[in-house]
């Protein structure tokens, strides 16, 4: 059934119900090709079914042989037109061929093999036609050249043998002299003998040998090139002559032959044939110079100079396309040279050059050898790929120049109309270049005349025009090119939002204000509507709409006390600004790599200054910052602060139209921007309060559920907070520190990937404690973090980091905090339950046994023991006893309640081997404590140990590296917050 349907469609396609002109232009060549093929290859009798379908397909589509031999018009080959169309697109094979039955997708007559045939015909027609043209030109040149060389050789080859004519003349002249001497009575001996005689061995001159050798070599090369050219034509004929059979058989046969073409380098052989002829010509010219030198030296040097000049230009013309992809002097030899270069010359990269120079100065040979340049093979690349890359890089200029050429080169009104409509589809970068083209005035005249065709008088409003039915799309394209029409257009009856936007951009609303909304959409209302509906428009259209909305006061100042939570425009505006904040700083320029129509949030980055001014005028009371910093803040940072603060303000109002979801996504965009931006100390003073506001608001929204979307906001906020305050630690406040602790306690038992959700808060807290910020220690004490650690299953590394920095910092802050506050910290640490909690956390250090882990345990336990006082001796003895019990008589509760997160939603208990590792670490800590207390009893502890700070934890070092600071760098001077 499908075969008959396809046959019917294929045969009747030349007679369609479309435009007769189009029918004649598109389908007649196909029909002519079909009739010609019918005469050449008649159908075999007896076929039916699928074979009949295959014959119809063959008759309608020229095979590779006749496609390659298609006639050309003015030297340009017409692209073969495969099969009659079933749809509007002849190359849409899903419409062209019926679907395959189930499990028949690779059957002998499957659609994929027919598609393969059509595409291979196009490819092979281009390849074979190009090769045949080259070979035909080469044969003509080889024939003419061989005839010329033969003419010269026919005259010079005689110089390679004895010249008997000259010998006879010489002997005859000697005989005459002898007779004269006899007649005069002179002696015969006085006559000089002739130098030419048959008994003397003939030796040709060096000049004759070189001339004939060069010219015979040239003739040999030209005839060899002609012979190979004839063979190549036979190879090409065999390649395109496919046997009959099913589509799959023909496809596989063609693929087999194509693979053979690639494997045996036929294209390289064809490309080398012109090289042989060029070499033959060069050898002939060198022989010509040698031939003329003894005859006429000046003429010889003239020919020599001309030869050198011609071949210098030849070499230059061969190299230029390799260096400049736009150079039109490209030949097959250029491709061969370029491919050889990529295969022969390796790629040398020296990533460790700086390390090599340092090692060279220090005389370290081992580091020098490990830092040598890296040599690797290049990836093969052709000139075609290089050309495509160059076209992509210059596509913005080329598009403008192409449209300008098309408009100027043709006087066809339809061509000029197409160009005028296409200008609006150019990206912004190409539009700017096109505006500078010389044909732009004439294109605008054409656009004006086309606009008058697309518009008609509005009966209801005589002073206005309205679109002509059926020409809305054309009108929209023309208005997008030049949105300034002398008459006003009504748009209330237009359904397409794109056309409505184009009409809106055409107005001068200073003139229309006060005339009522019965004829036009209000600019502010229209902008709010398209922004909230996530409509996609070009950036130029968005910019124009924002300008028009500003003229009607759409960006008036908002009062926080009377804010209407149902008005989503301010929130949408802030969301768009925050989402595009990172990209707007880099100064984007729209080109063909980016889509033409964008949502408002995506288009803001193309006109940031205009949006920044409007946001600041709308949110003046939210653009707050410390007075000392306000005057120094850049405008983007002020806009950033205002947008975030307004979003947080809206978060406190009742939700309307998914406003809280919009706010959450906006805050995540803001956090991502802070994370990626390199922030100076001056900007940190404005960013830190914003981060603290985001974190506090997110924790309020946090429902203590790992599945909550606000969980990720809290996580990102804490991570950004911990990275930002490292630049200026004194800028953090108690409010922000309490939020960090709140997030740590809320998500303490929630796993996230291979860590816990609260680990990022632990790392932030340990970094603050490592910076010796007094406020961090006050919050740690007031929030009773030690009690929290003791009542929950502690996390191995993160808990150790926080507690180790807390213990070490207490002994170092004697001069910063007053003695009473330090004593409060010491007393809290030496409460029996807290002391055991601290010792058990510091003694285990997770399930790691390497040397660095033991060093961290020793330093942390030592720092904690040095804080003891006389009244704490009993508490320490009890704590040491409990540690011994953990290793000897453990009831299982201490180790079994610890858990290790192994995935996003799964954590497991410690295994027996991991429990044994922790017990070994505890025994090591007990050993260190016993030695420490024994030395204390004998007075051997140096007072200098009290101020010794153990090495920073691994996570603190990582955070320091993330922000570009080394762990050993001097910390900022501590200030009281």
Image (cartoon, rainbow, N blue to C red):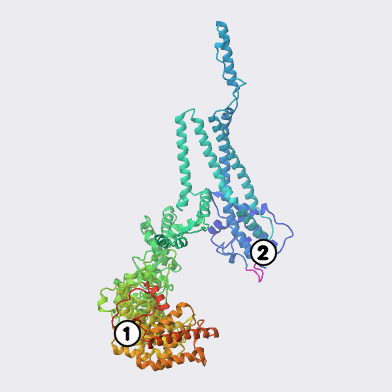
- The answer to whether residue 32 of the structure is visible from this angle is no
In the structure shown, which secondary structural element does the residue marked by tag 1 occupy? helix
The image shows residue 725, relative to residue 477, as above or below, that is: below
Residue 218 screen position, x and y as percent: 56, 37
Which region shows up in magenta? 99-107
Residue 740, by quadrant, is bottom left
Q: Is residue 596 magenta?
A: no
In the rendered image, residue 179, in percent from the top left (x then y), is placed at 58, 9
Q: Secondary structure at mark 2?
A: loop
Which residue is the site of mark 1?
Answer: 775
Question: In the visual, does 145 lie left or right of 488?
Answer: right
Between 517 and 109, the one lying in front of the other is 109
Q: Residue at x 32, y 88 (%)?
A: 822
**Circle 1 residues within 10 Å: few <14, some 14–19, many ≥20:** many
The residue where tag 2 is placed is 109
Q: Residue at x 44, y 53 (%)?
A: 410
Residue 792 vertical placement versus 448 (above, below)? below
- The quadrant of the picture occupied by the N terminus is bottom right
């Amino acid at each position: 059934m499908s075969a008959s349907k396809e046959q019917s469609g294929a045969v009747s396609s030349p007679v369609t119900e479309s435009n007769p002109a189009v029918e004649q232009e598109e389908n007649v060549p196909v029909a002519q090709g079909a009739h010609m093929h019918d005469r050449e290859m008649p159908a075999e009798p007896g076929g039916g079914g699928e074979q009949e379908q295959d014959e119809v397909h063959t008759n309608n589509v020229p095979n590779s042989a006749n496609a390659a031999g298609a006639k050309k018009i003015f030297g340009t080959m017409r692209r073969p037109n495969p099969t009659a169309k079933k749809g509007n697109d002849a190359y849409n094979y899903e419409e062209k061929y019926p679907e395959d039955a189930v499990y028949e997708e690779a059957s002998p007559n499957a659609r994929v093999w027919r598609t393969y045939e059509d595409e291979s015909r196009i490819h092979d027609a281009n390849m074979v036609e190009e090769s045949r043209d080259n070979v035909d030109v080469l044969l003509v040149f080889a024939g003419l050249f061989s005839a010329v060389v033969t003419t010269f050789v026919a005259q010079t080859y005689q110089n390679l043998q004895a010249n008997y004519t000259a010998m006879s003349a010489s002997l005859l002249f000697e005989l005459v002299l002898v007779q004269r001497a006899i007649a005069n009575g002179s002696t015969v001996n006085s006559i000089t003998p002739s130098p030419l005689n048959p008994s003397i061995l003939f030796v040709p001159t060096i000049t004759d040998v070189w001339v004939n050798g060069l010219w015979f070599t040239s003739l040999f090369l030209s005839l060899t090139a002609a012979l190979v050219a004839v063979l190549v034509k036979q190879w090409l004929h065999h390649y395109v002559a496919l046997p009959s059979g099913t589509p799959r058989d023909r496809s596989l046969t063609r693929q087999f032959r194509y693979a053979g073409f690639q494997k045996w380098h036929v294209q390289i052989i064809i490309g080398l044939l012109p090289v042989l002829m060029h070499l033959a010509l060069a050898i002939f010219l060198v022989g010509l110079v040698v031939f003329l030198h003894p005859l006429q030296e000046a003429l010889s040097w003239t020919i020599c100079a001309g030869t050198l000049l011609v071949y210098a230009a030849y070499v230059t013309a061969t190299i230029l396309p390799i260096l400049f992809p736009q150079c039109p002097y490209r030949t097959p030899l250029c491709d061969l040279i370029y491919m050889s270069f990529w295969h022969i010359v390796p790629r040398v990269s020296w990533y460790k050059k700086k390390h090599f120079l340092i090692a060279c100065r220090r005389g370290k040979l081992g580091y020098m050898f490990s830092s040598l340049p890296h040599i690797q093979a290049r990836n093969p690349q052709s000139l075609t790929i290089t050309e495509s890359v160059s076209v992509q890089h210059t596509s913005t200029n080329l598009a403008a120049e192409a449209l300008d050429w098309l408009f100027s080169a043709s006087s066809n009104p339809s061509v000029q109309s197409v160009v005028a409509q296409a200008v609006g589809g150019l990206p912004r970068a190409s539009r700017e270049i096109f505006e500078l083209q010389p044909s732009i005035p004439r294109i605008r005249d054409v656009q004006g005349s086309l606009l008058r065709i697309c518009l008609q008088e509005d009966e209801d409003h005589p002073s206005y025009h309205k679109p002509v039915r059926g020409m809305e799309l054309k009108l929209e394209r023309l208005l997008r090119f030049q949105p300034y029409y002398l008459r006003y257009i009504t748009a209330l009856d237009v359904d397409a939002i794109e056309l409505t936007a184009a009409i809106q951009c055409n107005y001068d609303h200073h003139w229309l204000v006060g005339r009522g909304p019965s004829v036009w959409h209000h600019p502010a209302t229209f902008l709010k509507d398209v922004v909230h509906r996530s409509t996609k428009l070009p950036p130029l259209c968005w910019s124009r709409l924002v300008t028009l909305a500003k003229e009607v006061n759409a960006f008036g100042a908002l009062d926080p006390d009377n804010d209407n939570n149902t008005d989503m425009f301010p929130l949408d505006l802030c969301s768009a600004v925050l989402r595009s904040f990172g990209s707007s700083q880099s100064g984007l320029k729209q080109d063909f790599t980016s889509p033409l129509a964008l949502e408002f949030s995506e288009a803001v980055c193309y006109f940031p200054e205009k949006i920044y001014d409007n946001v600041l005028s709308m949110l003046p009371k939210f653009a707050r910052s410390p007075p000392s910093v306000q005057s120094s803040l850049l405008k983007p940072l002020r806009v950033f602060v205002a947008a975030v603060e307004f979003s947080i303000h809206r978060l406190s109002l009742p939700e309307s139209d998914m406003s809280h979801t919009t706010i959450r996504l906006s805050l995540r965009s803001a956090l991502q921007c802070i994370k990626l931006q390199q922030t100076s100390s001056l900007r940190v003073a404005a960013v830190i309060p914003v981060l603290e506001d985001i974190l506090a608001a997110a924790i309020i929204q946090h429902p203590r559920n790992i599945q909550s979307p606000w969980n990720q906001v809290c996580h990102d906020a804490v991570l950004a907070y911990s990275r930002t305050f490292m630049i200026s630690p004194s800028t953090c406040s108690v409010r922000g520190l309490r939020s960090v602790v709140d997030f740590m306690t809320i998500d303490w038992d929630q796993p996230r990937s291979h860590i816990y959700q609260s680990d990022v808060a632990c790392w932030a807290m340990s970094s603050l404690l490592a910076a010796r910020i007094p406020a961090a220690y006050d919050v740690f004490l007031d929030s009773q973090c030690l009690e929290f650690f003791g009542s929950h299953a502690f996390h191995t590394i993160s808990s150790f980091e926080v507690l180790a920095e807390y213990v070490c910092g207490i002994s170092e802050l004697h001069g910063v905090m007053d003695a009473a506050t330090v004593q409060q910290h010491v007393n809290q640490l030496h409460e029996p339950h807290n002391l055991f909690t601290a010792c058990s956390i510091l003694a285990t250090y997770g399930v790691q046994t390497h040397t660095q882990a033991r060093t961290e345990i020793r330093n942390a336990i030592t720092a904690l023991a040095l804080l003891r006082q006389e009244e704490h001796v009993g508490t320490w003895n009890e704590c040491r006893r409990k540690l011994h019990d953990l290793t000897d008589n453990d009831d299982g509760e201490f180790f079994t309640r610890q858990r290790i997160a192994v995935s996003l939603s799964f954590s497991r208990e410690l295994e027996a081997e991991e429990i044994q590792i922790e017990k070994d670490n505890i025994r090591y800590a007990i050993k260190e404590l016993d030695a420490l207390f024994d030395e204390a009893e004998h007075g051997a502890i140096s007072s200098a140990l009290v101020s010794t700070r153990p090495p920073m934890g691994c996570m603190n070092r990582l955070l320091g590296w993330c922000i570009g600071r080394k762990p050993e760098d001097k910390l900022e001077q501590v200030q009281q917050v």
